[in-house]
Image (cartoon, rainbow, N blue to C red):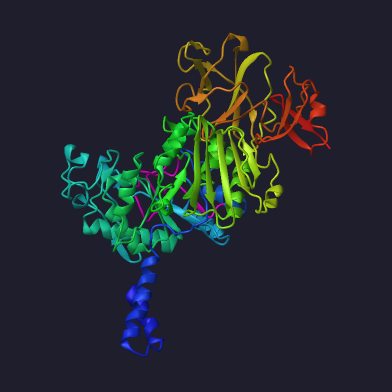
Amino acid sequence: MVFYYILRIIRKVNVPDMKKLYAFVAVLLSSAAMMAQGWPADYKGVMLQGFAWDSYADSRWTVLEGQADEISEYFSLVWVPNSAYAGSMSMNMGYHPVYWFKQDCAFGTKAQLRSMIKTYRDKGVGFIADVVINHRNGVGTGGSWVDFPAERNNGKTYRLGLADICSDDECANNGYKPTGAKDTGEPWNGARDLDHTSANVQENVKAYLDFLKNDIGYAGFRYDFVKGYAPKYNGMYNAEAKVEYSVGEYWDGNPASVKTWISGTRVQGVIQSAAFDFPLKYYINDAIGRGQWSRLAGSSLASDATYKRYSVTFVDNHDTYRDDNKCPANLEAANAYILTMPGTPCVFLNHWKAYKTAIKKMILIRRLAGISNTSLITGTKTYSAGYHVKVKGSNASVMCLLGNTGGIVPNGFKLALEGSNYKIYVEDKLDISPLDDLKDGDGKFGMPDCCTPEEGRMYAFFEVPSYWNTSDGIYCWCWNDGKNFTGGTWPGVPCTKVGTTDKGNEVWKWVGPASTDGTPTGIIFSVKGSPQTSDLDYHEGGYYDNMTGFLGDMSTSAIGGITVGSPKGNAPVGVYALTGAELRRCGAGIPAADAVRGLSPGMYIVGKRKVAVNQ
């Protein structure tokens, strides 16, 4: 196809001799090869992961389309769940697809998908498809594992059979006889492993990717479980599709292994895919989440001059946030780190919802400074309880300080943003006035009016997802290492329904024993045991949902109408914005009303309590 277009161009160009013709063709071929290099160089965009596990309400195509004006201001790419039909139109994340060309799923119909993609494309934002080609499920007729459907696209029928399944797939031990080659990667026991050495599999995959890109309108691909087959096949598929954005989920904390996979996607010496920077993610877990600051000095893709272009950095995703792989603390600071680093940052939907104003400001700082995926790290330092990194953008340098850096204030820099356990400085020359248009509290979590405090008691709130059936009630299980505060017999004790949110979701409240009875560390909400949330960190008066977990509490959420009295004690009184930024420090014992006097109308934190400033 490339040669066809080159010949058409040559016929229209006056080339005086063959030597110049060869040179001309070489330039064109080189340009064509550059079109598919896995991820653009000097890319300044930021990606949003627009979903979490079971985020059926928040990530429906119609819901995301309705947020296009806001999201398109800050993100250049949006990664969405697998849109192929996986056997159900409800409560199915799609990671065991049955069909490829049938684009109706739990998040919406094909028509809604097309509409969403077009709406964002008109605003300059591309969508990244979640592509699952390592494995596939059958339609289940008669209980069969291998009855793949026949699908027609562009007048041609596509179908897979036993010859397209790896011979060492687990179905071979369950009455079937797959005749494909042995798996070229790691096995996946949840569905049939496809044999990517098969010409028929390759033809099916290439047609599917062409359909996603040129028919549905996706701008790029996120490949699921790429450990399951040799990287050369991703290279082959991307080179054929000529896709600009490709990122592989090579889930491994060893940077050498991820780099080897990236290099393995080469076609004619050209890398064809980026990868998620799992090594950096685990360094972030240990450093920013657990205080092991020297871990950030480790070798990641983002810190490697050769591979930072192909690094897609992240703090958490739909898989990691649900288990021990999640970043355990300081999520806002962790996002500050990836948004000031080389690589292409991918912000997780839950973090976007919980820290929206701060993340907006971080993205604006990145944009104003001109930081790209190939920007240069010009300095780092590890402290006993902190770390800093300095990155040179095309317009100015940025310095991100994490944890306790000994009160360092970099010479020639000014403070652009600060929050819990981080500060971001930029060079004095950089105009950061656009940050002033983003007010603290914009997009912050607001606790529903039905939530009321319980003085002197343990208590918490849970917003039930719309797809949970609460006919058996909501139960709470709350504990610490030495004691259970909910009876000691799973699933705990019943909660009380206290109201609904503006979206119509039910809100339930647990009230426990006296606060003096101990300090809980964990809490779980469930429908009498199942379904249930993951293990959540306990916060007095905390408000939780099933997707994000902890959203805020009675002292810091933007709940209207609460004005508190004077902070107690002899310590200086700090006044904080809802983002955590300290605005002023007053003398000990000053009344809260005086501490906030003169500030703009809004909510502030004084002495760990919230204070309202009215007109």
- Which residue is at the front of the view, 276 or 290? 290
Up/down of 332 relative to 361, above or below: above
Q: Position of residue 267 (x, y in %)?
A: 29, 61
Looking at the image, which is closer to me, 547 or 263? 263
- Relative to 121, say whether 339 is above or below: above
Q: Quadrant of the N terminus?
A: bottom left
Q: Check if residue 72 falls in the magenta segment.
A: no
Task: Residue 364: tell me if it is visible.
Answer: yes
Q: Residue at x 79, y 39 (%)?
A: 600
Q: Main secondary structure of the magenta part?
A: loop
Q: Is residue 108 visible?
A: no
Residue drawn at (47%, 55%), measured in percent from left and top? Answer: 374
Identify the image quadrant of the C terminus.
top right
Q: Position of 166 compared to 101: left or right? A: left
Residue located farthest toward the top when viewing the structure as drawn: 517
Place of residue 359 in the rendered image (x, y in percent of width and height, measured from the top left): 59, 44
Image coordinates for residue 399, horizontal then vertical, percent: 57, 44
Q: Is residue 80 magenta?
A: yes
Q: Which residues are magenta?
A: 75-102
Residue that appears at 35% across and 49% down: 132
Is residue 437 rendered to the left or right of residue 237? Answer: right
Along the viewing direction, whichever of 21 and 393 lies nearer the viewer:
393
Q: Position of residue 229 (x, y in %)?
A: 27, 48
